[in-house]
Amino acid sequence: MAVAPQPVYSKLRRWPRYKLNLPVRVVAQRGDKVVIVPGRGNELNEGGLAVFVGMELAADEQIALEFTPPYAGIPIRARCTVCDRNGYTYGLEFVCETEQDLENSLQISNVLRGMGSLVK
């Protein structure tokens, strides 16, 4: 009996992921306070990124993420939704609902075209 090959997970992604290691700031609303916590971004694509941050974030929570993409001088403040979690590493998806969200997405896409270190 032949076993069908299993699909490779990375091929199921909508966009390729790029390895990086950059400082980020997570901005979250906690009751009547805004909490800003530093973290590290370690994988980026057009739809979102993975970040390590020492704070509790809930699935489907919406936060803001501030970072300066590689080879870009202007920081981006992108709205994100928490998609998944592994310890304190979170998978964040960029929200694209407003004109500013779309501008941020375009800027990230342009930066990614100049990068070459894909995650295998």
Image: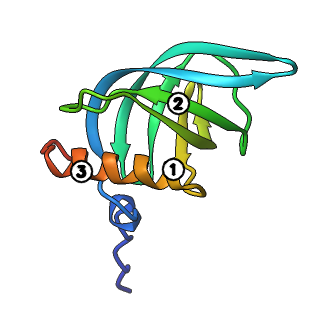
SS under mark 2: strand
Circle 3 is placed at which residue position?
110
Q: Is residue 75 above or below residue 13?
A: above
Quadrant assignment, res 31? top right
The Cα atoms of the two marked residues, 1 and 2, are separated by 12 Å
Task: Tell me which label, 3 or 1, sits earlier in the chain.
Answer: 1
Q: Nearer the viewer, residue 40 or 3?
A: 40
Quadrant assignment, res 58? top right
Task: Name the residue rendered at 18%, 32% in the picture.
Answer: 71
Colour convention of the picture: rainbow
x and y, in percent, of residue 109 in the image: 29, 52
Residue kind at label 2, given as amino acid type: Leu
Quadrant assignment, res 56? top right
Q: Nearer the viewer, residue 35 or 107?
A: 107
Circle 1 is placed at which residue position?
101
- Give the side of residue 17 with respect to residue 56, left or right: left
Q: Quadrant of the N terminus?
A: bottom left
SS under mark 3: helix
x and y, in percent, of residue 37 in the image: 58, 13
Task: Name the residue rendered at 26%, 43% in the picture.
Answer: 18
Residue kind at label 1, given as amino acid type: Asp
Task: Name the residue rendered at 72%, 45% in the picture.
Answer: 60
The Cα atoms of the two marked residues, 3 and 2, are separated by 18 Å
Marker disc for residue 65: 2
